[in-house]
Image (tube, rainbow, N blue to C red):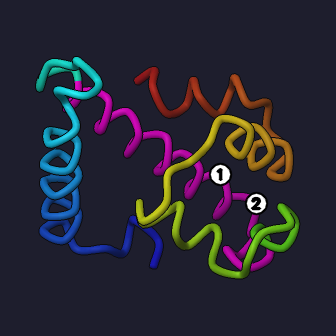
Amino acid sequence: MPLALIPFQYVSVQYDLKILELQQQSSYFGMSKGLMRKSVRQQIKIIEAIVSAREEAHISRMELSSKLGGSSTLMQKIETGDRDLKVWEFIAIARELDIDPCELLRRALVK
């Protein structure tokens, strides 16, 4: 389900669960809770930018997953936050969407 169609309460709960998961790891990473919250917000913005660019390009999740050489659920897992997005995947996704990766990142983080 595209992020735009997910009820806000669901996104909020998912966000809170992700924060809790990262807080449990905070001592391992040595990160402050404020820094972790900012990091999660940035991850969400990046995913939202990817979803928006994919929809603008009129490409389905399955089609993009196939172009990336992943399983049919690759993009679903990335877009719902069930799977972490690796840097090389972000670059590959941007290129498949015919967008400069820097521009896609700018769309996500500069507002």
Which quadrant is home to the N terminus?
A: bottom left
Along the line of sight, the residue nearer the viewer: 13 or 105: 13
The magenta-colored residue range is 36-63
Mark 1–mark 2 CB contact (< 8 Å): yes
Pointer 2 local density, CA inside 10 Å: few below 14, some 14–19, many at least 20:
few
Q: Outermost residue toward the front?
A: 28
Q: Is residue 86 left or right of residue 80?
A: right
Image spot of residue 40 (x, y percent): 30, 38
**Is 54 situated left or right of 83 in this image?**
right
Amino acid type at mark 2 = Ala
Task: Provide the secondary structure element on which disc 2 rests.
Answer: loop
Q: Secondary structure at mark 1?
A: helix
Residue toward you, 98 or 85:
85
Q: Main secondary structure of the magenta part?
A: helix
Q: Is residue 21 above or below residue 91?
A: below
Q: Which mark is residue 57?
A: 2
| Residue at (14, 18) in percent of width and height | 32
Q: Which residue is mark 1?
A: 53
* x and y percentages locating residue 84 in the rendered image: 50, 51
